[in-house]
Image (cartoon, helix red, strand yellow):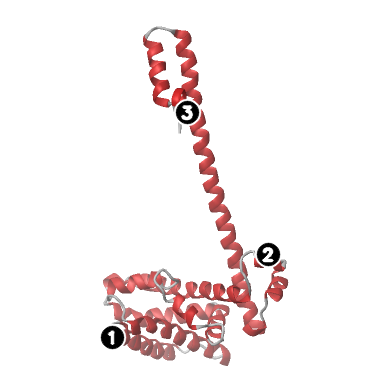
Amino acid sequence: MYTGENSPVLLHKLRDSAKISTNPAAYRVLDVKVENLYINKLNVEVNIDNTFREGVQAMAKTINIKEKYFRSVMETTCKIGLENITVRSMAKTLGVSEAALYRHFIGKDQLLSETYFYAESLFWDRFAAEIYSHGFSDTFFSEILEQVWIGIFNYLRADDVLAVFLLRYRASAEYTDQIRKDSMLSGSEMEPVMRIFRSQIGEPSPSGILAFDAALDACVCHVCRGLRLGANVDPELDRKISKAVSEVFMAHYTV
């Protein structure tokens, strides 16, 4: 904040007074002060802008690094199983020091839980994208859910690492009741999807919240069963399962 003799208002008044009084020397001195004042203000604004930009870039870099870690954890889970993952083994796989991982995670539990939340966010973001792609505002909502689930099946097949990780983590002891609750809280990975459902159907019941969790399980199990058997995609089976999931989901959402 500028005060006293460096106050912008006071300098403007003094400068204009000097100009009016036809005192060229005083006017030039005060004009330089005013100019310097604005140059300093501009420099402060530039520094703030640069600091903000650097902060955003640092945050983006951290996000990119963590996403790289998450994807590696998912891939490693598919190869050696969840129970065999440690901070040390992941550091070796990633080619970084254990200290580098500990800068982001306090231990294995947090590394795995954050990887799960990341994986779940990919699932629900895709779910929201599938709904939007079908133009839900122009169609009776329940009628498009079957097509949405089929889109999810194909998405998981294209990213089998995601599907297998979700299946294994949710079947493990790591998937505690607390993590299940955290994943379904307002503001969680499900929130974009929840906003759509609230606008189209209304506020979900407690069983409606659980219906989301059950639907995720059904999708992942269906896809992973096919991957495990090496079976070709059966469109008719996809349709039957998507229909069953949709019916159960809609029956429980507002009950």
Q: Does the CB distance between marks 3 and 1 fall below 8 Å?
A: no
Q: Nearer the viewer, residue 243 or 170?
A: 170
Q: Nearer the viewer, residue 194 or 178?
A: 178
Q: Which mark is residue 204?
A: none
Q: Position of residue 105 (x, y in %)?
A: 61, 69
Q: Position of residue 208 (x, y in %)?
A: 34, 82
Residue position marked by numbered label 1 in the rendering: 255
Q: Earlier in the sequence, mark 3 or mark 1?
A: 3
User: The N terminus is located in which quarter?
Assistant: top left
Residue position marked by numbered label 2 in the rendering: 100
The amino acid beneath tag 1 is Val
Q: Nearer the viewer, residue 80 or 185?
A: 185
**Residue 199 in which image quadrant:** bottom left
The amino acid beneath tag 3 is Tyr
**Which residue is most to the front?**
4
Residue position marked by numbered label 3 in the rendering: 38
Measured Cα–Cα span from mark 3 to mark 2: 44 Å
Q: Does the CB distance between marks 2 and 1 fall below 8 Å?
A: no
Q: Is residue 205 left or right of residue 36?
A: left
The amino acid beneath tag 2 is Ala
Q: Earlier in the sequence, mark 3 or mark 2?
A: 3
Residue pictured at 54% horizontal, 76% vertical:
116
Residue pictured at 57% horizontal, 92% vertical:
229
Q: Position of residue 45 (x, y in %)?
A: 49, 38
Residue pictured at 28% horizontal, 85% vertical:
255
Measured Cα–Cα span from mark 3 to mark 1: 64 Å
Q: Nearer the viewer, residue 21 or 209?
A: 21
Q: Is residue 196 left or right of residue 116?
A: left
Is disc 1 placed on a helix, strand or loop? Answer: loop
Crowd tier of the residue under label 3, counting other residues whose Cα lies within 10 Å: few below 14, some 14–19, many 20 or above:
few
